[in-house]
Amino acid sequence: MRAPSRPDMPLLLRLYHYGLAALEPAAAAILMARRRKGKEDPERMRERRGIAGRERPPGHLAWLHGASIGETMAILPLIERLSRRGVTVLVTSGTRTSAEIIAKRLPPGAIHQFVPIDVPRYMRRFLDYWQPDIALFAESEIWPNAILALEYRAIPLILINGRLSERSFRRWSRLPKLAEALLARFSLCLAQNMGDAERLQRLGAPHVVVAGNLKFDSPPPPADPRTVSALQGMIAGRPVWVAASTHPGEEEMVVAIHRALARRYPKLLTIIAPRHPHRGEALAEIATDSALNPARRSLGEQPERDVDFYIADTIGELGLFYRLTPLVFVGGSLIAHGGQNPIEPAKLGTAILHGPHVHNFAEVYATIDRAGGALPVADAKALAAALEDLIADTALTREMARAGYEAVQSLGGALERTLRAVEPYILDVKMERR
């Protein structure tokens, strides 16, 4: 594929490139600070400096990058399909949580590495070793030095599952020459919807196609059937709801909501899965201070009959807890965070409740809301009232769950459209190698 004509490097891009080269010692210090806070894997710190932790297999290699859990899980079906075609897939992400989860779900032959920090020398070292034939970045990952290094090596770069919110568009619009210089270096941008496509084009992306949202084609999170069955037996006969991916500020609301609902439902079990599992201890203290009896899954504790507040402070187990109840509140939405992904609970047949702050997934929530599969609530008081009604009306809860499932199923197809768009670049790579 011929690369589009590209503008020269504007001053800001040059300053970024040479500035990060000069500030490499500071980048190393930042990595060490993150390690002390538990945000970096001490055994794999070298990968963040572009030093490989695995051997590169021979043959074609595609580099797929997703920043964290959501982006990485969304591209998992694409990873599987490319692997089946005989292409080795190198997957990079930037968080420990994403690394732990993706390691359990990668197809045979695929490799995970932590993405290097966007320092020129780190990125050169990474690309010199792995020598990818093509690079695919997910959603809104725009790292200038990575983009420049790929261009220098004439490696095609494609944005997949591309997303550019109105807020991000306004920020980039203040630096139009920089935005155009970066986006013009993408061979292709595959946008989630028309709005994303229009914003990418206005910022200078020369080749944009609407392919849809890969998250609709991602399989639901797995769970061990034996564990599901054991927990279902343990909580049988109790009203149960899950507060998933909650953030500080919401967690105190969940405790207060449990106390309010327990007046009508004394056997109520609230399961809370915080977005950041390390908050398990703090959550247990909040619950205890409110006269609740908590248990923490990370400590091996179970939701016994005397437990009314079960803290799911583990990684990669949301699929288990979504299967235990038909009623889920998706967090990050009662505070001004922007909401978390509702597609997974919808695919697993749950009725969904969410707050007003869902701009990160506005289109998805709008679709599920219109179908009747999700119910928006204004605040904690409204959430408590909605939960009280739905616990009492199991038929309505089942109908909401069915509507949400059908809504997300109807929005699939992005995987096939993405594969068709990427196919010519894969063929080019293979022909050039021959």
Image (spheres, rainbow, N blue to C red):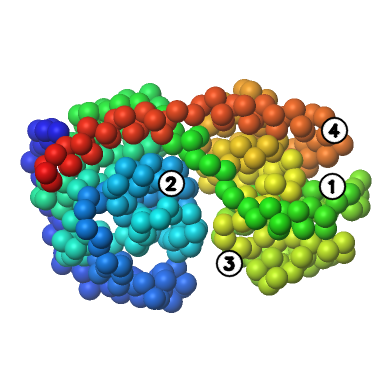
Q: Pointer 1 and pointer 3: residues touching (CB < 8 Å)?
A: no
Mark 2, Cα crowd under 10 Å, few <14 / some 14-19 / many 20+, is many
- Residue ID at (28%, 35%): 422
Decide if residue 266 is on the left or right side of residue 179.
Answer: right
403, above or below 277, in the image: above
Q: Earlier in the sequence, mark 2 or mark 3?
A: 2
**Circle on res. 278:** 3
* Disc 1/disc 3 C-alpha distance (Å): 27 Å
Residue at the spot of label 2 = 76
Q: Position of residue 111 (x, y in %)?
A: 35, 59
- In space, the residues marked 2 and 1 are separated at their CA atoms by 34 Å
What numbered label is drawn on residue 239? 1
Image quarter in which the C terminus is found = top left
Residues at circles 2 and 3 in contact by the CB criterion of under 8 Å: no
Q: Amino acid at mark 2?
A: Leu
Which three-letter amino acid code belongs to the residue tagged 1?
Answer: Pro
For disc 4, the marked residue is: 393
